[in-house]
Image: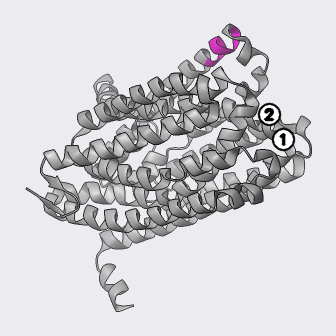
């Protein structure tokens, strides 16, 4: 208890701990609630329909990336720096929301063009339109605002509300395979309701109004988010695109096998999101005050997160067969080998998050960060187009693993070259 009190000896650390607890509770809900519905859905929907929904989700995720435009990091940083200046915060909020709504309209037109142009999308157009509601909800929900203000409890409460609503509704309304359209509808409804409530909180509790900022400030936000946007697009080319490419080259059943294994891995990866989201604005502030203090903090984070994530990845690899049989059922036996291949991603990605987002972005190596991710995406796409036609879902799993390893190793050696010794916790 004495050590705990010593750690919470300043307002900044108390706020960091509060944010971590809020995000930990959120991630707990994000982890537990899908675990409740996931085994139910994969059995009720079957491999083919589950694969179709996964393909639709992968498709609309591109539009989520477009509408996010890197603001979850760039706008978070701006809000964090200026949070004591209400007028500046309002200007940032208004600029970002204007850009995001413009990108939302563009995204919907692109979706319509996609549906009208290709039979694969046209024959199941309802699934894609209903899934697009998640994009609307994400635009409405200013996660970046709450992160920048370091008020994570709002994110926690509203996201749990949306997830809980979706979980309850699934068991009430989805009873058989023919109910598959209700899944994206209910999911989108939860996102949109949470987004509307989030905006009400911004206006009511933070007294932030909406104003029309000048064009120069909107341009500034676009420039600030550009490198992060490009990086996020690059990341999607070896994450989201894998499900998308698999769906283009194969069928919904093959996608279902891969998506089920990937969902399990992402559930484990998601355990580290609260830490990443909570510490990013805190590390940003520490690094801006003292780079030496910042790198020491990053060193501690590396050893703690690295150790825990390695243990979890090892468990996934060893118990892959048992996990698939318990959570997915015997019809997903082909997912076992995929889970074994993908099991090392939580460890690899946890490290790349520390090296890239927590270190490279905070030390202003945004351009190098983007280049590494773009290179990885090129490698992933190249491997995917070679391996998927030959080995289908196994091929895409291998492509993902190689790409993520490339990212983590490249980031580590780039920082070493720049004199940032994370393992030693010093700058030379």
At horizontal 33% and vertical 71% (from top left) the residue drawn is 13
Question: Which quadrant of the structure image shows residue 394?
Answer: top right
Q: Nearer the viewer, mark 2 or mark 1?
A: 2
Left or right: where 4 falls relative to 414 = right
Report the span colored magenta: 111-116
Q: Is residue 279 visible?
A: yes
Q: Are marks 2 and 1 in contact (CB under 8 Å)?
A: no
Can residue 245 be seen in the rendering of this structure? no
Quarter holding the N terminus?
bottom left
Residue 71 among magenta residues: no
Relative depth, front residue between 107 and 409: 409
Q: Quadrant of residue 151?
A: bottom left
Q: What residue is at 54 percent from the left and 53 percent from the top?
A: 343
How was the colour assigned to the protein in this rendering? one colour
Lateral position of residue 370 relative to residue 401, left or right = left
Q: Return the residue found at the far bottom.
A: 2
Q: Quadrant of the C terminus?
A: bottom left
In the picture of the structure, the residue carrying the numbered disc 2 is 48
The residue lying toward the viewer, choosing from 387 and 234, is 387
Residue at image location 76% in from the left, 60% down from the top = 326
Helix, strand or loop under label 1: helix
Please, is residue 6 above or below residue 153 in the view?
Answer: below
- The residue under label 1 is 45
């Amino acid at each position: 208890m004495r050590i705990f009190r010593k750690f919470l000896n300043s307002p900044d650390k108390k706020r960091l701990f509060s944010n971590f607890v809020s995000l930990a509770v959120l991630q707990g809900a994000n982890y537990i609630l899908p675990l409740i519905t996931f085994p139910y859905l994969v059995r009720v929907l079957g491999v083919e329909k589950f694969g179709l929904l996964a393909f639709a989700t992968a498709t609309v995720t591109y539009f989520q990336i477009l509408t996010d435009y890197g603001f979850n990091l760039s706008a978070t940083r701006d809000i964090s720096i200026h949070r004591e200046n209400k007028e500046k915060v309002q200007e940032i909020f208004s600029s970002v929301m204007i850009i995001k709504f413009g990108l939302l309209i563009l995204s919907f037109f692109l979706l319509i063009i996609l549906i009208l142009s290709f039979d694969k999308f046209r024959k199941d157009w309802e699934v894609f339109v209903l899934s697009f509601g998640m994009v609307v909800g994400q635009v409405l929900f200013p996660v970046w605002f709450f992160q920048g203000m370091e008020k994570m409890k709002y994110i926690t409460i509203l996201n749990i509300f949306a997830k809980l609503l979706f979980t309850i509704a699934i068991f009430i309304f989805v009873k058989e395979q023919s109910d598959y359209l209700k899944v994206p509808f209910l999911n989108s409804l939860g996102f949109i309701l949470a987004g509307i409530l989030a905006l009400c909180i911004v206006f009511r509790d933070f007294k932030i109004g909406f104003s029309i900022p000048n064009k120069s400030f909107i341009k500034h936000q676009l420039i600030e988010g550009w490198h992060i946007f490009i990086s996020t697009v690059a990341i999607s080319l070896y994450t989201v695109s894998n499900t998308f490419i698999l769906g283009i080259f194969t069928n919904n059943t093959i996608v279902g096998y891969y998506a089920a294994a990937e969902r399990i891995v992402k559930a484990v990866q998601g355990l580290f999101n609260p830490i990443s989201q909570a510490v990013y604005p805190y590390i940003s502030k520490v690094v801006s005050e003292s780079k030496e203090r910042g790198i020491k903090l990053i060193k501690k984070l590396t050893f703690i997160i690295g150790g825990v994530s390695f243990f979890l990845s090892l468990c996934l690899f060893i118990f892959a067969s048992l996990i698939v049989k318990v959570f997915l059922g015997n019809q997903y036996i082909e997912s076992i080998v995929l889970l074994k291949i993908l099991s090392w991603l939580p460890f690899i990605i946890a490290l790349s998050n520390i090296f890239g987002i927590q270190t490279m972005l905070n030390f202003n190596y945004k351009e190098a960060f983007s280049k590494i991710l773009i290179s990885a995406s090129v490698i992933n796409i190249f491997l995917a187009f070679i391996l998927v036609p030959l080995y289908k879902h196994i091929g895409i799993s291998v492509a993902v693993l190689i790409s993520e390893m490339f990212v983590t190793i490249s980031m580590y050696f780039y920082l070493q070259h720049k004199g940032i010794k994370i393992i030693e916790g010093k700058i030379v």
